[in-house]
Structure formats: C-alpha cells, structure tokens
Amino acid sequence: KLENATLKAELGRATWKFLHTMAARFPEKPTENDRLALKSFIGLFGRLYPCGDCAEHFRKVLAKNPPQTYDRNAVAGWLCYVHNIVNKRLKKPEFDCNKIGDFYDCGCGDEDKNKEK
Ligand code: FAD
C-alpha cells in the first residue's frame, strides 16, 4: 500500500499533542509508581505506535535518550527534546523548549482537585 503522508502527519500531530499534554499534567511530585508508569507507557508506546518506520526510529531515539521521569518539568523537557530530534530528522524547525510553559493545556480544569488527592 502507498504511504499517505497526509494521514501520517495527522497521526503525528495528534500524538504529539497528546504526549505533550500528558507531560504537562504529569505530577509535580510523582511517586515511584507514577514514574514507573510513565517509563512503561513510553516503552510500550515505542513498540505500538502504528507508523512502523516512525516507531522503529523513535525506539533508537529512546535508547539514546531514556525518559526523564524525576518530575513534571523533567518529563516535559525530555519530551520536548526528543520531539526536536524527530523534527531535525524531518527537517522541521526546532521548538524552543524554554517556551513550553502553558502551551499544552488539557482544558480539563481539574488540576486543583487532583492536587487535593
Ligand atoms: P509536529 O511535529 O506534529 O508538531 C505539532 C506541533 O507541536 C507543532 O506545530 C508545534 O506547535 C509543536 N511542537 C513542535 N516541536 C515541538 C517540541 N519539540 N516540543 C513541544 N512542542 C513542539 N513522520 C515521518 O514522516 N517520519 C517519521 O519517522 C516520524 N516519526 C515520528 C515519531 C513519533 C514518536 C511521532 C509522534 C511522530 C512521528 N512522525 C514522523 C510525525 C511527525 O513527527 C509530525 O508529527 C508530522 O510530520 C506533522 O508535523 P507538524 O509539522 O505538523 O508538527
């Protein structure tokens, strides 16, 4: 079957949006279990991402740059960094990771509620 670049790009955009939003909501003070969950998730993501060539390349990126799970900032910074590695390979502009701030907001409005838990 022919590669469809439009669909591949659409999947990529949706996926990055999800991943960065997840990172932006990762606990500021994660438990060991939170950290393990993130690590496992990324490992499984690298296996299961439906674009096979993308996943294969991303697994190599992950092998060299394992997920940083210390806290929310570490996760968001790490993800921005590895996304930039993919950007570079695809000759896309580099994203300034210092400007990530509130760029990814899930619109869930339940951050404070979660903090109380
Ligand atoms: P995207 O890269 O999809 O980014 C979406 C938006 O996120 C940007 O518009 C920008 O606002 C923001 N952004 C950009 N860089 C960053 C950053 N570093 N941190 C935070 N936010 C940022 N496509 C291929 O053709 N070949 C591949 O091998 C390939 N591998 C991929 C691997 C993974 C894990 C994923 C998720 C996607 C992959 N893709 C691949 C798809 C590709 O990365 C893009 O998603 C797709 O080409 C659409 O690009 P885009 O220009 O819309 O921006």
Image: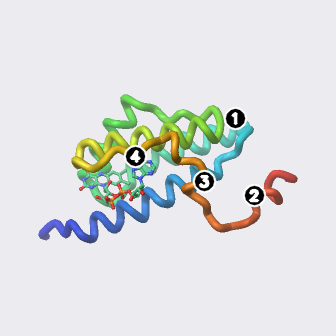
Q: Residue furthest top?
A: 64
Residue depth check, mark 1 versus mark 2: number of the one nearer the observer: 2
Q: Is residue 46 above or below residue 71?
A: below
Query: Which residue is labeled 4 in the image?
Result: 95
- On whether ligand 1 comes within 8 Å of the CB at mark 3, the answer is no
Give the label on residue 114, or none: none
Q: Amino acid at mark 3?
A: Asp
Q: Is residue 117 above or below residue 94?
A: below
Q: Amino acid at mark 4?
A: Phe
Give the label on residue 111, or none: 2
Give how far apart the Cα atoms at labels 3 and 2 are: 13 Å
Q: Are marks 3 and 1 in contact (CB under 8 Å)?
A: no
Is residue 62 found left or right of 79 in the rendered image?
Answer: left
Residue 36's image quarter?
top right
Query: Which residue is labeled 1 in the image?
Result: 32
Give the camera-side residue of 109 and 31. Answer: 109
- On whether ligand 1 comes within 8 Å of the CB at mark 4, the answer is yes
Is residue 110 found left or right of 40 in the rendered image?
Answer: right
Query: Which residue is labeled 3 in the image?
Result: 102
Give how far apart the Cα atoms at labels 3 and 1 are: 25 Å
Q: Amino acid at mark 2?
A: Glu
Q: Which quadrant contains ligand 1?
A: bottom left
Q: Secondary structure at mark 2?
A: helix
Instruction: Point out the tag, 4 or 2, that comes first from the N-terminus.
Output: 4
